[in-house]
Image (cartoon, rainbow, N blue to C red):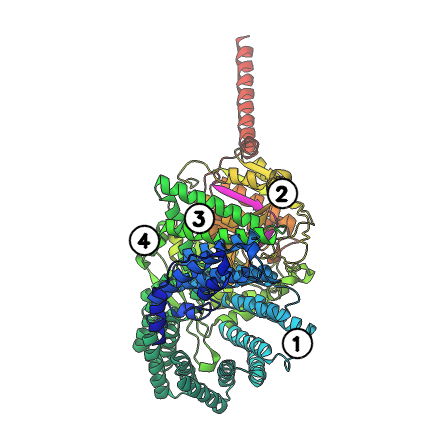
Amino acid sequence: MLVVLLATSLLVVPPFSVDAADDLDACLRQAPVQSPPPINWGEGVPQMWSSTPPVPRDTVRAYLSQVRAARACFRTLDPSRVERPYLGNIMRTFQVETALLAALRRFADAFETFEDARSYLNAAPNIPSAEGTRTGWIRALHQDQGFLHFRIGNLSASITHYSTALRKTSEHEVGLRVTHLLDVGLLHQYTQDYQSARRYYTRARRLAREHDRTSEEHPSEWARLLYLQANLLLEETLNTEFDRASLRRARDLARKGRSLATSSDRRIDLALALSESLGYLGSFDRAYALNAEVRRYAQARDDAQLRAFALLKLGVLHMQTERWTEAESVLNTSLAIAERMGNLDHQRRIRRGLGRLHELQQNWATAEDQYRAGVAVIKRYRESLTATQWASTAFAQWRDVHRGLVRTLLAQNQPRAALAALDRTRARYLRDLRTRNRVATQLSPATRARFDSLGRALTDVRNRLGTDSLSDATEAALRARKASLMANRQRVLRLDSARTPRPSVDEIAASIAQQDRTLVSYFLDDPWPVYDRPPRSAAFVLTGDTLQAVALPGLSQDSIRAHVNTISSLFADRQASRSISAMHFDLRPLRALHDHLYAPVAAHLPDGQPLTVIPDGPMFHVPFSMLATAAPGGRYDHEQARFVLHERPTALDLSASLATDTSATRGDAASSSSDLAAFGVSSFDPLRPPPPSLPSSRADTTAASSLSLPPLPGVRSEINALDRLFDDAKTFLDEQATEPAFAAASQEADVLHLASHALVSPSSSLRNAFLLHPDSSSDGLLFLHELQTRDRALPLAVLSGCNTARGTLRGGEGMAGLQYAFRIMGAQSTVSNLWPTADRSSVALMESFYENLRAGQPKDQALRQAKLTYLENHPDNLSPFFWASAVLYGSPRPLQMNASDGSSLRTWGPVALALLVVLLGWSLVRFRSQLGLDALHQ
């Protein structure tokens, strides 16, 4: 009834006509301070997007008109005649308007209103205000905009805005700073960047302790901190490596937080976390009791969402204790609630639980049905996210439903359907972003001009945001401008109508046959130890006319990860790259990886035939060609060792369907010769720090410190070698290697070679950067989102820097590093490095690789031969550390590259010399014969 009466009263609000004598009161009566809005920032906004919104949408629309009228009222006042502060009231109207627009799903309008609010505030209106009003509202607007980005799926932008809110918070507001540190940490946790999340939680804890914010005086703050830390440990343990010590730590944190919680809601959250940790640790009685407490609370509060979630956790407990009938009953009850509420995330979790339940009982067909239903739910949810950062992150967490479907199909001996299901889990985010770029090239001239204009403006805004010298007002305006430009670009693209279907298994096989290759796609299972289910790993071996699913019994992601971590300290600890011991690669784990991964499929591979490998999980950290086929001399006897490298060329890719990406483009062997543009920087300014949001790929740097990078003297030799090898190469070294030079040359080049240090963003591949040389118009930071303006495919990108193949390992996407970003930009293939390379070995390998390309070899064969040549020429550097780091991703097709005049002379010189000798010999014989005839005549 109250809602109806409120709606009625809002609909008859008259237009404002304020007399100065009325002062402030007439405006205040209609403003949010005295007339509370029906919806405000918080959970009320996303609840409005459900099928049963808590407030009628007409009520929201009516109040939207009212709040705008209230602001118009305030702005008609004469500030010189008003003594009371009211700037905060004006800003409050902006804040409420953004919430109302978001509730109505008018997101572009909401972002424009954020921009209007900051512009108004930055204009420094001469309006009475309380102390701290202006800075406080800057912080609050960033917080609200970050929340909206979070709710609509743009997690990267959400991190940016919450980080800005943190920076805009006064050092004296310690409690608020702690809150925002926890907010940013939680957002990183959603991206599965657990290391960053842990760092922010640790900073929050340290800040609270430094300012004597004890748990006794601030119990709510500490309860939230302990809950988030416990939740992080649970999630990290269950999504990466199962670790009982971490589970015990999560249990202890949840217990302590529960003793501190002052609100019932927080106490219940902690009870559920404690119940979950106790269940995984085997304390079932106590876990059941805590779960019952949560369900009673949900029943008393009529909280259907909490009840559904508690029933899901109860079903998991029943599965752990093998109470199969009870588990199915409560999971189906939970599913019915989630379906009535339209909660797709809960439906996905419950379908996964039901699939696991029937899988554990070996009811394969029923398990398949549940997983397929879960896949349909994920599809519905994901379509609403489009090509945003969260689409990648969320799907990384949702893949286990698809992978469950793969397992059940394998159990039913359906390898073709299983491979198709597996391939649908891979490179989805990459394909989304490629679709966006492809659509951009197919727009009409007028629309494309509009899109390009928005793109240039967006690039300019992003680059300006990458500096550290912005005022608060300028930065706020740029952030808002960026959000508006991104929304406008999305509207122009209309992505949903442009997606193309994935190729079928038969189409992939036909492409593989045409390339005369074999494809092996790995599926490394990762069962939860709490369910006591053996792993069902497999390798799909696909040729032009056969498909075999080769079982890999007993193999799991954890077992492979354990072998990888023992190859060298370089793999277990990235900071170990400075240690000389990191160069000594242990052949035992490399042999074990061969025995587990390569040996089972080798019998199905024709001798010497090139191989395309689709890795899974921790396999991405290890070059496949480095697996040891023989190690007769001991752990570190690399001289007698043999590797897959000696047997066949190998290329990697992110999905089987991407391996069909071999369409002829300028630069392929079948077309005209390729243009090469090479950029190298050999020395770096130690005073230039990276942007705050972009930590260096080097482990010893932080976002807040100055970036001091060592020189790369080998880069000069590398660039000079390319100049000698190719007569049409455009090379740019040091002072010449600037952003403007790159922007001009890269548009026409078919091969891009970049030799410099790299910066890797943990949250967004497109925020990765290469360091070029600064000039008067640019800072030298080449962000990879700037490559989005290319309107055609790039046949090859060679990223000759340290760790250019590394990045955050994301489920289904591989490592989201620099090579991944270039694949997004349309690179058909990349050569990049998995660890910091020795300078001289990198130069030797690259020079040999390009010589082989120039000779017409396919890319994988060219890289293989370069490594074999290096081993032959460098008998003192036989450890894989020196030669194995470079990996090829993507199309192995050859390129037609013209040699320079000088290199042609080196190539044909011996032949010419031999011809000259023959010619001289023939002339001499002829001369002597002539002498003989003359003597006879005499």
Q: Nearer the viewer, mark 1 or mark 4?
A: 1
3D distance between C-alphas at marks 4 and 3: 20 Å
- The answer to which of marks 2 and 3 sits earlier in the sequence is 2
3D distance between C-alphas at marks 2 and 3: 26 Å
- The answer to which of marks 1 and 4 sits earlier in the sequence is 1
Q: Nearer the viewer, mark 1 or mark 3?
A: 1
Which one is in front, 813 or 347? 347
Query: Along the horizontal axis of the image, is 134 left or right of 285?
Result: right
Callout 4 amino acid:
Ser
* Crowd tier of the residue under label 1, counting other residues whose Cα lies within 10 Å: few below 14, some 14–19, many 20 or above: some
Q: Which residues are magenta?
A: 749-761
Residue on which disc 3 sits:
826
* Crowd tier of the residue under label 4, counting other residues whose Cα lies within 10 Å: few below 14, some 14–19, many 20 or above: few
Callout 3 amino acid:
Gly
Residue on which disc 4 sits:
497
Q: Secondary structure at mark 1?
A: loop
Residue 504: give x, y in percent of width and height: 31, 58
Q: Nearer the viewer, mark 1 or mark 2?
A: 1
Callout 2 amino acid:
Pro
Q: Secondary structure at mark 2?
A: loop
